[in-house]
Image (cartoon, rainbow, N blue to C red):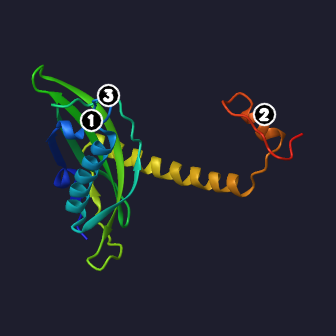
Amino acid sequence: MNGHPVSYSESTLTELMIPAYANFGGKIHGGTLLSLMDKVAYVCASKHAGNYCVTVSVDNVHFLAPVEVGELVSMSASVNYVGRTSLVVGIRVLAENVQTRTTKHTNTSYFTMVAKTPDGQKAEVPPLILEHSDEIRRFAGALRRRRLRHYAAERMDDFKNSFVVDKEVRAFLADERCEIRLPDDT
């Protein structure tokens, strides 16, 4: 299977933020932005994979700045990493105020997508050809996030499976904003 360079599937979605997208605070609803990010992630991943792709996880969604009604939002997506059937698409979101000609970075997110065959089975994806040091950094960063996520998931499983409310847990939670009131506490 022949690989594709990152540039092959780079995609940008630009949309005007209209009043219907606003939340009760008058800013663009985070769910609207996530939906748009999901669309551009799909376009980018499907172009690289040559197959339908579905979202399986979203990492690092941090809203750094609010998006205002009337701004143009551009979401730039590129494939940062490929596994056998999965791809990580990095998305950079910029909001532009066309009146003041200012642009702000509102967030960066990583969508993990899985390629599917027409009958719904997982499909193998082409390798990713890395041509620039930034592309190598993004690939390595995505691989590191993936490994850390698996490590953390294993540790959390261990934690859940062996959890007891003991002195250590009580000490761990002592300075937090919670009170432990178990029926057997006297």
Q: Quadrant of the C terminus?
A: top right
Q: Earlier in the sequence, mark 3 or mark 1?
A: 1
For residue 157, what is the image quadrant? Answer: bottom right
Q: Earlier in the sequence, mark 2 or mark 1?
A: 1
Q: Quadrant of the N terminus?
A: bottom left
Residue at numbered disc 1:
28
Q: CA distance from mark 2 to mark 1?
A: 41 Å
Residue at left 32%, top 76%? 120
Relative to the observer, which residue lies in front, 45 or 93? 93
CB under 8 Å between discs 2 and 1: no
Instruction: From the top left corner, tell me how far across and down residue 42 is, in percent.
Output: 25, 57
57 sits to left or right of 164: left
Depth-wise, is mark 3 or mark 1 nearer the camera?
1
Residue at numbered disc 2:
171
Q: Residue furthest bottom?
A: 119
29 sits to left or right of 168: left
Residue at numbered disc 3:
65
Q: Residue furthest top?
A: 100
Name the residue type under label 2.
Answer: Ala
Name the residue type under label 1.
Answer: Ile
